[in-house]
């Protein structure tokens, strides 16, 4: 990187810190700090939700998966198939109750519906999994950022962690949302610029694919399921398993759901989900196009390809950026990658702080509710600092350890997603289920997924864990409720009725319809593209 590139990065970091400070001056309560006063516009929430998925790994990992990773290719596109219908499920089932209760953490609902123990268990799982998982995400993004900066990995992780910690501690969720939006535009623009640069190299010479390269252009794997056949990226695993994964991630994980709570109304939250469901597919198409063009680029630039020998596939894009992107423009792109690395940490810090304060500390010391607003905000910021420090230190520790630690933490998260989602849906969709039934179901579902992990991890795709764990939890809990009924009063605000479903459908009919159209458009366009590429691959 040139002095100009470093100057651009320094200006960006300074801008982030100043923005956090400026926003934080006007925060007078925890409602301001954790849910931005519940007045964030839908389009800002939508872009922020998208940006949390557009990490540095998206710009780096997706093209590398397509162009270089063993077993990779355009099958990555299947990750997007379930997004529109997952957004429908969240806006139809979960958002109405969250906004009806005006809560700060979604785990408050579990206490209101079931009881304190279930809230503490699920929130505790979130704190552990997200606290460690954010450290792992920081490490993963720190690796590629270190390559771009040509810095040692520990120093890069520390810089990312400290900067994210400063602006998030001051600015809260609102600073996270604004930084996410800026990051999204920079990274999307970086992908488009990279496509233009690489096309300038390969456009005149033609798209040169070897027979091995052409297999990477296969999108849909119809004939395998990921159930017992050892194919983790099958169409059915990524559609069905992906549906439950996305519903749980966006609807039952505080780090994402907290953004939906920052909107003024259920309608605004539904609109944010609607926009996310429509815009994610073209964003991912941009990254994958970059990846496809990298295939012939590697074929026509053997010296560059040789320089990647022995390096992880994720080093492909950073090396391309460093060697082929002009100075100045490189600084802007690196700033975007740096910002994306911070986004893997900032959202987690704020949500971990919120869950710690409202799900744990207030239950231990109820007197915290009586603190002046200024003291509550100060304590919230202190918790943010603590969790940011924990995540950063964990990332530094893992960086010195074995790679299997990363795999372990990610698989633990997958083991819990389906059962936790089932716990929320048991409360929202059933009248019979009570705390004991839900706890038995949750523990059974997690145990079931752990057994799948232990004995069938090579045969059954990890994506299926989300669906199978969800189903097992639902069946066990509802069966327990039928066998051991508990007669106790239940507030109508905590369960969705048929009238609620009809009313929501009437109010959100156009959004639901367009998301269904988007779902089928994505499937059909992918199949058509797959047929076209298949014919192209068969040509001599």
Image (spheres, helix red, strand yellow):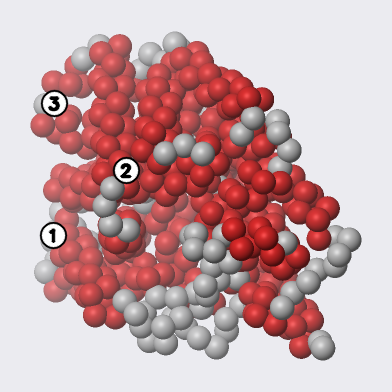
Q: Which mark is residue 395?
A: 2
Write down the residue under mark 1.
436
Q: Nearer the viewer, mark 1 or mark 2?
A: 2
First along the sequence among labels 2 and 3? 3
Q: Are marks 2 and 3 in contact (CB under 8 Å)?
A: no
Q: Secondary structure at mark 1?
A: helix
**Which residue is rendered at x = 30% and y = 70% of the image?**
469
Q: Nearer the viewer, mark 2 or mark 3?
A: 2
Closest to the observer, 312 or 267: 312
The span from disc 1 to disc 3 (Cα, nearest Å) is 25 Å
* Position of residue 247 in the picture relative to residue 488 (left or right): right
* Position of residue 450 in the picture relative to residue 58 (left or right): left
First along the sequence among labels 1 and 3? 3
* Position of residue 159 in the picture relative to residue 122 (left or right): right
Q: Quadrant of the C terminus?
A: bottom right
Q: Categorize mark 3 by other alpha carbons within 10 Å: few (<14), some (14-19), many (20+).
A: few
Q: Secondary structure at mark 3?
A: helix
Q: Are marks 1 and 3 in contact (CB under 8 Å)?
A: no
Closest to the observer, 515 or 8: 8
First along the sequence among labels 1 and 2? 2
Q: Are marks 1 and 2 in contact (CB under 8 Å)?
A: no
Percent x, y of residue 260: 47, 40
**Which residue is rendered at x = 56% and y = 22% of the image?**
10
**Which residue is rendered at x = 42% and y = 64% of the image?**
244
Percent x, y of residue 463: 41, 70
Write down the residue under mark 3.
366
The span from disc 1 to disc 2 (Cα, nearest Å) is 37 Å
Can residue 516 be spotted in the picture? no
């Amino acid at each position: 990187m040139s002095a100009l590139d470093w100057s651009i990065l320094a200006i960006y970091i300074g801008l982030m810190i100043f923005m956090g400070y400026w926003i934080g001056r006007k925060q007078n309560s925890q409602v301001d700090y954790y849910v931005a006063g519940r007045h964030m516009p839908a389009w800002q929430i939508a872009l922020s939700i998208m940006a949390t998925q557009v990490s540095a790994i998206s710009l780096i990992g997706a093209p590398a998966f397509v162009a270089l990773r063993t077993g990779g290719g355009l099958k990555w596109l299947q990750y997007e198939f379930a997004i529109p219908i997952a957004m429908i499920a969240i806006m139809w089932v979960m958002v109405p109750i969250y906004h009806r209760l005006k809560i700060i953490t979604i785990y408050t609902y579990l206490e209101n519906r079931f009881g304190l123990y279930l809230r503490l268990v699920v929130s505790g799982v979130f704190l552990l999994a997200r606290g460690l998982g954010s450290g792992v995400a920081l490490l993963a993004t720190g690796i590629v950022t270190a390559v771009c900066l040509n810095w040692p990995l520990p120093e890069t992780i520390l810089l990312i962690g400290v900067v994210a910690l400063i602006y998030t501690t001051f600015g809260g969720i609102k600073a996270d949302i604004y930084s996410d939006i800026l990051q999204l535009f920079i990274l999307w623009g970086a992908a488009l610029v990279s496509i233009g640069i690489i096309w300038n190299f390969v456009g005149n010479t033609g798209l040169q694919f070897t027979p091995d390269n052409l297999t990477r252009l296969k999108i849909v794997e119809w004939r395998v399921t990921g159930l017992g056949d050892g194919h983790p990226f099958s169409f059915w695993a990524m559609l069905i398993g992906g549906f439950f994964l996305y519903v749980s991630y966006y609807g039952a994980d505080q780090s994402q759901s907290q953004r939906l709570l920052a909107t003024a109304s259920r309608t605004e939250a539904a609109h944010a989900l609607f926009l996310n469901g429509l815009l994610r597919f073209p964003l991912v198409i941009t990254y994958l196009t970059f990846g496809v063009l990298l295939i012939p680029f590697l074929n026509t630039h053997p010296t560059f390809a040789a320089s990647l020998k022995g390096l992880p596939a994720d080093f492909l894009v950073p090396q391309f950026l460093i060697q082929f992107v002009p100075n100045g423009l490189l600084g802007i792109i690196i700033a975007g990658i740096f910002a994306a690395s911070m986004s893997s940490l900032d959202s987690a810090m704020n949500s971990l702080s919120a869950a710690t304060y409202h799900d744990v500390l207030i239950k231990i010391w109820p007197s915290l509710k009586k603190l002046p607003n200024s003291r509550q905000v100060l304590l919230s910021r202190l918790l943010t600092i603590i969790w940011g420090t924990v995540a950063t230190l964990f990332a530094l520790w893992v960086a010195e350890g074995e790679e299997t630690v990363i795999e372990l933490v990610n698989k633990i998260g997958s083991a819990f997603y389906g059962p936790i989602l089932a716990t929320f849906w048991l409360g929202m969709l059933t009248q019979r289920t009570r705390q004991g039934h839900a706890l038995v179901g949750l523990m059974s579902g997690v145990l079931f997924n752990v057994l799948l992990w232990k004995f069938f991890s090579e045969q059954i795709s990890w994506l299926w864990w989300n669906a199978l764990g969800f189903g097992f939890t639902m069946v066990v809990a509802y069966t327990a409720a039928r066998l051991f009924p508990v007669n106790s009063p239940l507030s109508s605000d905590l369960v969705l009725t048929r009238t609620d479903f009809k009313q929501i459908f009437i109010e959100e009919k156009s959004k639901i319809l367009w998301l269904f159209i988007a779902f089928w458009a994505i499937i059909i366009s992918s199949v058509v593209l797959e047929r076209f590429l298949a014919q192209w691959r068969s040509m001599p």
